[in-house]
Structures are given as structure tokens and as C-alpha cells.
Amino acid sequence: MVNFLQHTFNGLVGGAFLALLALGLAVIFGMLRVVNFAHGAIYMLGAFGAYVLLTEVGLSFWWALLVMPLALALFGMAVERLLVARLARLDPLYNFLLTFGLTLILQDAVKSRYGVQSSPYDAPEILSGSVDLGAFDFPAYRVFVLVIAVAVCVGVWWLLSRTRVGMVVRAATERPELSTGLGIDVGRWVTPVFGFGIGLAGLAGVLAAPIRAVNPLMGADLIIVVFAVVVIGGLGSIFGSVAAGFAIGLVQAWVQALGEHWALLSQVLVFLVMAGVLLWRPAGLFGREEAPA
Amino acid sequence: MRTRAVFVMLCSTTLLATACGGGGPKSDAAGGGLSDGKVVFGVLNDQSGAYSQLSGKNSIKAVELAIADYKEKYGDKAVVKEFGVETADHQNKPDVANAKAAELYDRKAVDVILDVPTSSAALKVADVAKEKKKLYFNISAATTDLTGKSCNKYTFHYAYDTYMLANGTGRNTTEEGKKNWYIVYPDYAFGQDMEKSFSAAVEAAGGKIVSRDAAPFPNTSGDFSTYLLKAPTLNPKPDVLGTMQAGAELVALVKQYNEFKLRDKGVSLAVGLMFLTDIHSLTPAALAGTTYTDAWYWNYDLTNRTFADRFKTVAGVRPTFAHAANYSAALQYLEAVQATGTDGSDAVVKHLEGKTVSDVFLRNGKIRAEDHRVVHDAYLAQVKTPAEVTEEWDYVKVLRTIPAAEAFRTPSPDCKLS
């Protein structure tokens, strides 16, 4: 039982990363109808940025946690203004290609400067111990990650449901033409929302730096899983992507804990779930059918 | 496309034949002398991906050092006057490796292919070497199949293999009294081969595999926490966690091993395969006290250190064992050509078989005639504590030399040369 609880808790931590990344993707897709393939590369930049800040500027993890998401959000806004916006009226495939191209450029730029070998990065001293969670001990840093992720998800929910900005974003996500028709300036919020989604990926990257291998390809494989998570939750559904992120993290942890011959299943599981969900509810678990109201 | 390739090939063959002086082309392997008047090395490896730092482009630098040493040693008496080094990136993909190897041999006139990390790719290249009857020294791949069921007359396995790693680390750790093992391995050819070799070595030394887990490969999330949570809860509790992960996955796993404080919980860490570059990226602090088997270490003695100094001036970093082995293989190939007076594959193979060799990489080296395994001393190494590290890249102390005769397996009955 204790073992089960441990694996469950651990699954939630794994899910936290998926949820943060999926949340950013969902916000961007909802507002811009852009499938941001560069999300994995931004996650990598977040982690790498933390490393560069530490080794070349001397800024600690806490500064990185603040600086990197903001810097990447600004970078995202610039990318939206200069590149994404220009392709917005064309077929969505163009922006898909653009962000895919950006991914390759970003990965190779980092690779040519820092090589492919993983770079060292440690958790801050204060979080390097364990926390007593009653039934079991757990690394403090992982608990911290979970707390941050949950706080961010709740914060985004509050923003969307309780503020005027959130109302505009929700309206624009659900009925873009109608919102514009009602005189809401949707365009004004496109750039900040894109930047916000990118910032979330950067945050996930910084959080990942102390416990995962920091190298130029760290986001390349992960992003595929995150896409599957977003599809399971329902494209553009903010709640759905967060819920699916945590759920997939949980199920992966449980299956991996089963034993030697379950490795293959844990790897393809997320895609099996995706296929199942698509058959059962083509719009995803929490997605809304596009056509009638 | 294809017509053009054929056209180019026809042209170059014609040109070559003309260049060789019209008559009986000296390029024929059976005749003496050098094919097209020079020796061409083909360094085929990963130049952009996960293994590009442990060998990669710096292996080309190592080969160039060998050429320089050969020139210096023989001067005017050198049989080989002209050299070429061709290179290709196989991206760790077997199909790419296959195509690039054929291209190197056929179109780039390569006499011997070196390096080739990634077991699946390495095995493909062995097939090409066999088909083209050209030499192939594998340096960076681990699979024992190269000297087992996939062995052939033209393929030599030079630096290490899974048996060597398991026999060193697995046996030694077990004999130290850490008898209960929990093995985590990546679920693909290399990992499965490593798991088998380690299990066999541990059990032969009186140890027991408490549990084993296959981790997904590639591990998309980079997370191994499930296994680290599980390790202390197993019954009986394992003394050692043996990880067979490589490269970035090894880095992630070690980070998380430290995070979960398994050493404090009485589960020590044994690493299946580790390169100097892995220790560099994890920092010695993360790995302090970890033992593993090394095929060569740059600061082992003065000879190695002198080589490492030269390597550093051209490459900017200290050499991994793969770099040193590439140097050694290129040098031994040139020595063989010098001795036989030809780069004809059959003559060189005949000369190499059963030869005892010694250089900066090969200590007490012997090229086994039975299966073309190059046996040599290996080393049981331990990562230093940060306090012990006084120089960048000097992260390891050698605990024990494993004599060549013990380090490698006896020739496998699966291997039938010819």
C-alpha cells in the first residue's frame, strides 16, 4: 500500500511536467489555432538557460526560475509578432512547419555551442533533502515541483475564470468570430497569450534542469508525448490538457512499477490511450465538437 | 539520381584505372603494393547525436595523430607515403550505417573503416565489410555478437564489449560482498545484451539478481524515478543498483539516484558502461565512489598522459578510451601494411591474426585469430571524490588492472570465420 502511494505520488510529479507543457500548448492552440511544435525546444531552452545563467552569469536556480520564463515569454512574443502572425491567415500547416523549423534551428544552435553531452545542474541546497509525507519520505525537490505546477494550474484557472482578460481569452477560444463581432479586441491578446504559453514551457524546463539530463535534445522526444496528452484532453481545452497531463503521468508510473515486461507498454500507453479516446470521443475527453453549439 | 551516380562511378573507376598506369591495376587486393597508391581510413560514427562526444569528430583527430606517428617512425622507409581520412555520420541508424559503409569502401576508396558506435549499426557494417572483403575495426560498439554469431574474416573488435564490462564491474562488485543486485536496463539490443552479461557475471561470482527492470527506450520523459522508488522496497533489499543506461539516460538516472538518496538507504550504484565524457557532464560529485570498468584511462601512466597531452592540443579535451582506441587501430593497421608491403585485405588479415601488439592503448594486446577479438588489459576504475580531483578531466583512479587473459571471454563457438 505504501509502495502504491509512493508510485502514485511520483506519477503526479511526472504528470506535473506534462501538465505544464500541455497547458501552454492548449492556451496557444485555443487562442491562435497554432500547433506549436517548438514547445519542446522551448522547454530545453528553459533548462539550458538555467545552466547558462548559473555557469556564465552566476545566477542561482531561484533567479533562473524567475528570469527564464520571463525571457522566453518575451522571445515568444517576438516570434509571434515577427513570424507566426504573418502566417496566421494561411493554412495551419504553415505555422506547423514554421515552429518545426524553429525547433531544429534552436536545437542545433544550442548543440553547436554546447555540444550534445548533458550539462550538470544541481537542485538548490535547501531542496536537496527529503520531506516526510507521513507514510513515506520523498525528495523535497519533487514535492516542490508538484506544488509549483499545481499552483500554476490553479492560477491559470483563476485567471481564466475570474478576470476580464480570462473572459476575453475564453470567448476568443470558443467563438473567435463571434467575439470579434461583439467588439472584443481579440487581436490585442494574441501576442501576450502566445508569450504566456511559451513562458510556461520555459518554466517546465527550469524545473526539469536539476532532475533530468540537460542537453539539446531533451525536449525532442518529450514533445510527442505532450501532443498526445493535449489530444487526449481535447485540443484547446485548458482543463482537459491539465487533467490529461496528470492522468498520463499517474498511469505511466503505475505501469512502469509493474515490472520488467511492462516497459514497452508504459512507452506506448499514452498513444494507445490517445487512439482509444479518439475513437470514443473524437474531440478528446474534455474537448467540444467543433460544429454545432 | 541513380543514372548520375552510376555515371560518376564509371568515370571515377576509369580515372582510377588510368591513374594507376593502365596495365594490371595495382589496386587489386591480391597483388602487392597499395591500392590507388595510398591508404585511406574511413571514420564512420555519430557526429551529431548522443555519442558524438565520446568518439565523433575527435576520433578523426586521433587517426591523424596515428598517421603523424607512423610518418615520423618510418620516414623514408615508409611503405605508405600518401594518406586519406574520409568520414561519415551514421546518425546511429543501422540503415544509414549500411549505406555509408558501402559508399566509403566503394566510392571513397577506403581501405579500413574505424569506430562505428551503436551495436545495431556496428553489426550492419560488419556485413558490408564481409561482402566487400575490406577491413573493419570496430571500436565503440559493445555487442559481443561482433565476435560471436556475426563475426567474419574482415572484422576486428578492438576496444571493449559487454562481457568485458560485466566481468569487470559485475564480478568485482559481487566479490566485494554486494551480492544482491537490482538491474535496470534500456529495452533495446545493447541494454538486453548488457543485462544478460551482467546477470551471468554476477551469478557466476555467487551473487543474485533480486529483480530486473527494462526501462523504455528511448525514455521520452527522461525519468527513472519509478525504479529508484522501487529499489529499496524489494525483498531482499538489493545491495547494488546496476544501471545499463548509456549517455544522456545514464546522466538522468544518476541525477535521480542521488536525488532519492539511495546510497544513504544502503543501495550502492554500479554503472555498466561509462565514458569520461559522461563523468564530465555529471561532475565527479554526482558519481563519487562509483566503480566501473574502463578500457583505458588517460592519466593511468606517463605514456597515456603524454598521448593525452598531444590529443588535447589538437582536440581541446582529454581523450576517452574510444579516442585512444581509434588512434591505436589506425596505427596497428599502418604497421601491418608496413610489414606486409600491401594494403590487400587478405594479406593484412593474415598478418594481424594471432599477433601480439603493444601501444599506448593496447597493453599486453593480442589479436585473437579464432574470433578477431583484440584482447588487452582492462581496468577497474573508481570515480574520485570532488576533494581528490585536482585537475579538470582527471576524474578517475584505477583500482586494479584486469589482465588481458581474464578481461575478455574465451572465443565463442558461434563464431565461424572465413
Image: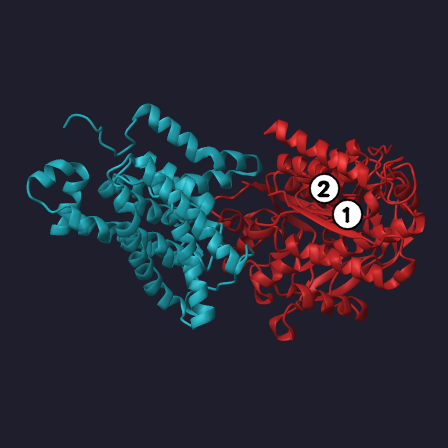
Determine the secondary structure under disc 2: loop
Relative to residue B192, is residue B85 depicted above or below? below
Which amino acid type corresponds to the residue marked 2 in the rendered image? Lys
Quarter occupied by the N terminus of chain A? top left
State yes or no: discs 1 and 2 in contact (Cβ < 8 Å): yes
Along the line of sight, the residue nearer the viewer: B38 or A25: B38
Q: Which chain is cyan?
A: A
Q: How is the image coloured?
A: by chain
Q: Is residue B227 left or right of residue B78?
A: left
Relative to residue A178, is residue B240 depicted above or below? below
Which circle's residue, 1 or 2, is located before the other in the chain? Answer: 1
The numbered disc on residue B40 is 1
Percent across and percent down for residue B75 are: 88, 62
**Chain B painted colour:** red
Which amino acid type corresponds to the residue marked 1 in the rendered image? Val
Percent across and percent down for residue B203 are: 74, 45
Res. A65 image quadrant = bottom left
- Chain ID for label 2? B
Q: Is residue B409 left or right of residue A127?
A: right
Along the line of sight, the residue nearer the viewer: A157 or B280: B280
Give the residue drawn at x 92%, y 49%.
B355
Percent across and percent down for residue A179 are: 11, 40
Along the line of sight, the residue nearer the viewer: B31 or B90: B31
Give the residue drawn at x 49%, y 37%.
A267
Along the line of sight, the residue nearer the viewer: A207 or B100: B100
> Could you tell me if residue A267 is visible in this image?
yes
Percent across and percent down for residue B91 are: 60, 43
